[in-house]
Amino acid sequence: MKMSRRTLAALTAAALPALGAASVANAAPPELPRVRGDEALARARVAADVLMGDYDQIKAWFPSSWWNSAVALQTIGDYMLRSGDRRYLDQLDHTFERNKGPFPAGELSGDELYGNFTSRAIDDSGWWALTWITAYDLTGEQKYLDMAVTIGEFMDDFWDPSTCDGGIWWNEERTYKNAVTNGQWIRLTAELHNRIPGDEAWLERAQVAWDWYLTSGMINEHGLLNDGLTDSCENNRDRVYTYNQALAIGGALELWRATEDPHLLEKARYFADSALAEGALFTGGILTEWTDVLGETTNDNHKQFKGIFLRYLMDLADTTSDDRYRDVVATQAATIWEADRTIADELGVRWAGKSTETSPNVFDWRTQASALSALIADLPRSGARRSLSASLSRTPVVMPDGAPTVRQLDLEVAITSTASRPVRVHLAAEGPEGWTLDLAPSVDLEVPDAEGEPATVTIPVQITIPADATDGNPLIAVNAKAAGGLEFTARTEVLVARTVDFDGGTQDEPWLWDAGGSGVTDEPGRFADGSSYFIYRFPFPASTTAAELTVTISNQYLVDLSPDGESWTRVLAEDEPLRDASNRADHTFDLTPYLDGDDKDVYLKVSDAFPEDGWGGQVHHVSAQFSGS
């Protein structure tokens, strides 16, 4: 795990405040109803589809983050194992085949990749090994297990008893022994033993690693894992991160499966109960990373830690059938869905949903993957064979021009059922007063033979927006119902705007025509590193005859304009490889030459002038002025 160059937070090794012992009662969870299995499946499927919408089919990963991509893909694997929905197997295999070779520094990761998903970051390699074991569990294909073995052998070279009497080094430079790498190692070695007939070598490694782990000093007096060891092999009293605690639970569980030693199952419970104690890793019954707290700054690594905890808490709940753990899982899932979800079913980093102007909640594919793990964990262990879900596309921005505007949305309906006959889904749409919404009143879906795979259909929803529509983000909702109590409501917003004025990264989604693998910083700003890019679309009113655009931009930018999103004209380029935003400035462009098409749409594309070093153009603010006949 490495810190993002854009979101690196100053981490302190301050001693933890006094924490309650593991026996302290958990905080009372929020009063939210526990959902049925069919509802849990529908929610998980929608969230998984949103996550996979950010999968880069060309590079075969999630943009801008190597280890995070491994964890996100394992989460999709968890979803497929739990739900029976196998639609994303091809993407898993595509990532395996496309990315198993070597890559130079900067192409997929900040580090050079040596091949076989290994690099100087030993814990990054470990996440990929765990992902390929999940792929093996899904498919039974030996190549995935063989890859996990290859990565395991690579990691084993960094087991070093000459320092601190054992442990895996965190990086190739051998600078740090920490909880994440060694927790991974125990889980990985035990998983390999449990899948390789007649194995003894991996089991021995797992047992040696476990014995060292327990006596390493990383486990503090409250049963929590501090981040690692000092150079003198003592607990560094650094923060307790949720994913470190997760791997303590997961490692103990998998080794218990290998040995049936009851003390290991007791240890898994101990590590879980230590985390669940109020004031440890939970606040008001909700799992909370310390960087989630209002006023703190998260980064791209922290965003996925909690999902890893839910993966292994799910494993413990399944293994023990303990309702205490099931209730904790249900609370996380319900709170995320009710308090931490956008209108587009994006899931954020703060599961309790808190957000302020100065400390906003953060939503991206990493937070989506993390929160998805909680929704997956809330699925019944045996899955749910019936479910109904629906989702609405987001319409482009509407800029009224004295006449009604017609736009079309796409409604996707998905259903799983045990019925051998077509399933009828009834549809009803709601929108603002004065708006007209037209769609079919019902649709029949043929359920596929493949168990767990949803039947899907896309239905057009035509929207007529009146000329006097008020500026804002009115809600459009379509309710879908089927027999047996199945019901789901899809939602979206339509941005009605007579002005163009937004911050990049925090307010730009309605204007974003193509995200192109771009990222968002904690400070307002959308950036495009390496081969990524992003495109904004400005649908000026039909009467527009002149327009100009002002963009606040920094770092290594390329800026192009287009009347159609296909033919581009370069209008700005940075010729110095700046990395400190010292060139941040406003640049104004005349858009009038681009207004001569069938419509008055103009497209702005931002990319990276020096793609080899990962400091591409970053847009902080956009505004426009326009006039018409």
Image (cartoon, rainbow, N blue to C red):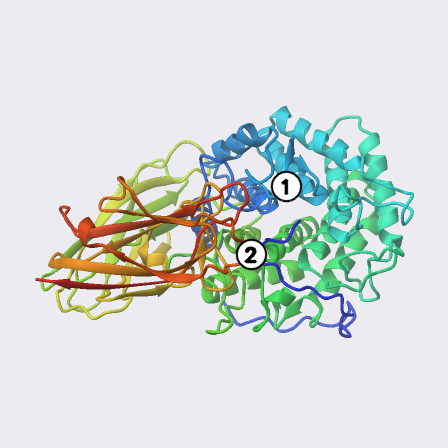
Q: Which residue is mark 1?
A: 111
Residue drawn at the location 71% of the way across and 72% of the way down: 25
Which of pointers 2 and 1 lies earlier in the amino acid sequence? 2
Decide: few, some or many residues near mark 1? Use Cα within 10 Å; few <14, some 14-19, many ≥20: some
Looking at the rendered structure, the secondary structure element under dot 2 is loop
As shown in the figure, which amino acid type bears the numbered disc 2? Arg
Query: Which sits in the foreground, 119 or 602?
Result: 602
Query: Residue 588 placed where, x, y %?
Result: 30, 60
Looking at the rendered structure, the secondary structure element under dot 1 is loop
Query: Residue 414 placed where, x, y %?
Result: 36, 45
Q: Answer left or right for 58 relative to 320.
A: left
As shown in the figure, which amino acid type bears the numbered disc 1? Asp
Circle 2/circle 1 CB separation < 8 Å: no
Residue drawn at the location 89% of the way across and 56% of the way down: 232
- How many marks can you see? 2
Q: Answer left or right for 261 relative to 543.
A: right
Viewport quadrant of the C terminus: bottom left
Residue drawn at the location 45% of the way across and 64% of the way down: 524
Mark linked to residue 33: none
Residue 383, placed above or below residue 473: above
Residue 34, placed above or below residue 516: below
Q: Answer left or right for 222 relative to 498.
A: right
Query: Residue 448 placed where, x, y %?
Result: 38, 33
Q: Is residue 439 visible?
A: no
Q: Which residue is mark 2?
A: 6
Residue 124, placed above or below residue 279: above
Q: Is residue 249 visible?
A: yes
Q: From mark 2 to mark 1, how far is it between C-alphas?
A: 16 Å
Query: Which sits in the foreground, 238 or 615?
Result: 615
